[in-house]
Amino acid sequence: GWAFAYAAVKYFAPNMSPVRWPPILWSADESMVCRAVTNEILIAEGFTLEPRGRLPIDNILQMALSPGSQTQPSLCALAAFSPATSSASPGTIRVYTDFDKDAKPIMTKSFFSESVSVTMKFDPVSGLDLLVLFHASDLTEADVEGRTLNGQGGNGLYLLRASNRSQPICSLSNQEEGCVVEAQWCPRDRSGLRSLVMLQGPQPAMISVFTYNPSDSSAKSPPQRVNIGRVGVRNCLRWDPSGTSFSIASRSYRGGGISSEGAALDIFDAAQDGSVARRGGCTLTTKRDRQDVVGPCVSRIDFSPDGKVLMIAVEAPVGAEIRFASVADGSPLYRLKYEELYTSCWQPMPAGYFEVPQFDRPTSQARLGALLGSGILEVAIRDKNLVYERVKALRGGEGTRDILENNNAVIWEVTSAWGTHLLEGERTSNCKELARRFCRQNKMDMSFANPLAQRMEQSLFDEWENPVQSQPQVPQQGQKPIGQSKSKGVSQSAAAPPPRKPKPTPKVIDFADKDAVRRRVRALQKKIREIDKLKVMPEGSLEKLQLQKLASEGEVRAAC
């Protein structure tokens, strides 16, 4: 055991630095060990440490081993980074899966950037997709210890996919968009889609989710990005082993003083359907700590192997302690106090040893985004009378009655990753035009206009199929009942809804007009691409209009 540890072998490692640490890496099954030396990587047996081979790599600085593959446990990948030797030469990243004598990399990518170091992370599902975070300057001691707002932030985030032939490398974020503070893979795929979460500055950090289909080797489009929002000054992100929860915190060491939120963290729920919601959080500062000049700070957070307890290493002004919080709501459980604390970790357990934890679903008001690439979470038609009273209260008793007098008017409440907004229109209006205008006014990505328009049309269709009679409000003194006629007091909202706008008849194409034929072909190809995207989505998440579009695949392909 560890109580009787002894040195099995000793190596000389010159020029040690935080960038080169650790100098020795073991594979997930400990069957192989890699050691970086001058211009090469030495491969040895994991248990006996007998030499197995070497990989010649010029000017190697960093390396990373994949955690293995869930589908192929024996698969192991190695990534090596060689920085640029001059301003005219590029930095290079090589990925290996073969470690024999004449092994060749399965991917080689050169970058003309001013990066002096990188952070490389393999995805935990396939063990081949590589996330690369470039750092433009040398890491200072304050960066390594988390004493800066950006921590070990980088100026560029890239995704390398050896299985994708059309676009093996994707740029997820560049220097103009802000410093990338942290990026972590989701431990498991959802509905065949792979995702990762990124924290990006300036502080308070923006939480973003990237999603893509790993099985589509010919996909040319980059991963879809959805911005969830900002919750505070955060520079640390951790997932639980099952991929059902993740936590973000402000990581620093004693005396860092990066923010007044240095002792706060948040816990988020990642449901099976991909929706992301804030489940809870906790603040580690007590009344006694607020009187001290140097408050407590979080140096490390980590989930237990069963995903039910969150371990929080805290450095107090005097001494240190490990606090344990419930992942269900962030409530404190117990604490362990120490005079000094250097590191802490859970005992590792094999994958699948524990069942996936089950928690109560957060309320709809707590939902922030989705892991499946959906930026629009909910679209519903709201009662005009309630909206009128709400606007009247917000304006101090003044409200417009135009929308109440227009029987054809409708109000949608749109819940998205950017918050909740109201969208006014008419039942006979073009939903696509309303959706585009809504995205422009709220500075949203225009790619969400089409799904928003589909949900608006679906809500109108549901209202027409299931009309609900609104209850007349009790009139105040000297005021006529809202929504009632002068004669019988019959509610106008109970009347039959106006007829829906008829669908446009398909335009007859003149085959002698080459431009018209070309436009028609492009329109049909666009429909086929949209149908192909719907095929990879879970069937339970599809709406009626999307199912109708899937059913029309044969008709569309026949028209081609």
Image: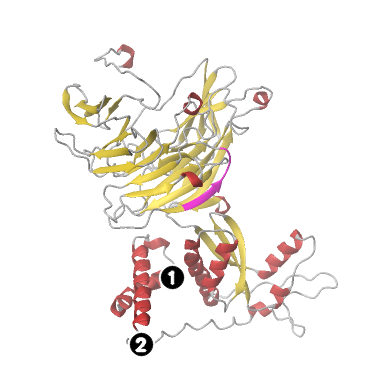
Q: Is residue 176 left or right of residue 129?
A: right
User: Which percent across, then down, holds residue 205?
Assistant: 54, 42
Identify residue type, mark 2: Asp
User: Which percent across, then down, holds residue 488?
Assistant: 74, 84
Residue 258 included in the magenta stretch of the image: no
| Separation of residues labelled 1 and 2 (CA atoms) | 33 Å
Tag 1: Cα neighbours inside 10 Å, few (<14), some, or many (≥20)? few
Q: Is residue 115 left or right of residue 97?
A: right
Q: Which residue is mark 1?
A: 544
Q: Which residue is mark 2?
A: 510
Up-down: is 33 above or below 206? above
Q: Which residues are magenta?
A: 226-233
Q: Is residue 40 visible?
A: yes
Quarter holding the C terminus?
A: bottom left
**Is 71 in front, or is 22?**
22
Tag 2: Cα neighbours inside 10 Å, few (<14), some, or many (≥20)? few
What residue is drawn where x is 71% and y is 62%? Answer: 390
Q: Earlier in the sequence, mark 1 or mark 2?
A: 2
Q: Is residue 271 visible?
A: no
Up-down: is 147 above or below 317? below
